[in-house]
Image (cartoon, rainbow, N blue to C red):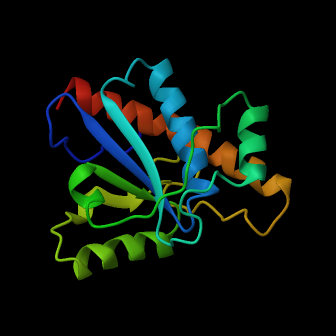
Amino acid sequence: MSPAVPPARTPGAYAVALVCLGNICRSPMADVVLQEHLARAGLDDRVTVASCGTGDWHVGNRMDSRAAATLDAAGYDPTRHRAQTLDASWFERFDLLLAMDRTNLEDVRALSASGGSTLDPDRAMLFRSFDPVEPGGEVPDPYYGGDSGFEEVLAMVERTTAELVAALARELDHP
């Protein structure tokens, strides 16, 4: 069984943010997959999902073409994504911030501390905390590699998302 998600701040609703470095590969792939799986589970009207990067190099850009092609080949729609940057407002807007790797998680926590935010440490964790194969592992950055890296990331994202959706359903059905 996957870990529990932190309690919703608003009864009956939940907000999840997915965080990576530039918001063009890992977190947008997870965003698209999570939104699709939530729709299939009938939870898309109660769970808000967004993704962002800790860096601002790609703000406004579409996701990496290799990430988009990998998603498209698997039947997902990658066309709506535009990169955005994490800022202090995300700590109040989202119930859970899921970082793709430990450096991203440290960056989330550092931004929270520097901005004077009161981010509950339980509300920021690694995305793969929900991975049934390697709980707490990192999602590797496929940016500097070939297509197989994007396929590997998609496989991790899909299996982790299944467990995350189950945890969100439990929270929403039994807060």
Residue at the image point whose x is 65% and y is 52% from the top: 63
- In the displayed orientation, state which residue is furthest to the front: 60
Say which of 141 and 87 sits in front.
Answer: 87
The answer to whether residue 113 is above or below residue 28 is below
Say which of 17 and 87 sits in front.
Answer: 87
146 to the left or right of 50: right
Residue at the image point whose x is 79% and y is 33% from the top: 73
Can residue 132 be seen in the rendering of this structure?
Answer: no
58 to the left or right of 44: right
Say which of 120 and 22 sits in front.
Answer: 22
Residue at the image point whose x is 71% and y is 27% from the top: 75
Q: Position of residue 112 (x, y in %)?
A: 26, 73
Residue at the image point whose x is 71% and y is 38% from the top: 71
74 to the left or right of 52: right
Residue 45, picture quadrant = top left
The answer to whether residue 126 is above or below residue 95 is below
Quadrant in which the C terminus appears: top left
77 to the left or right of 144: left
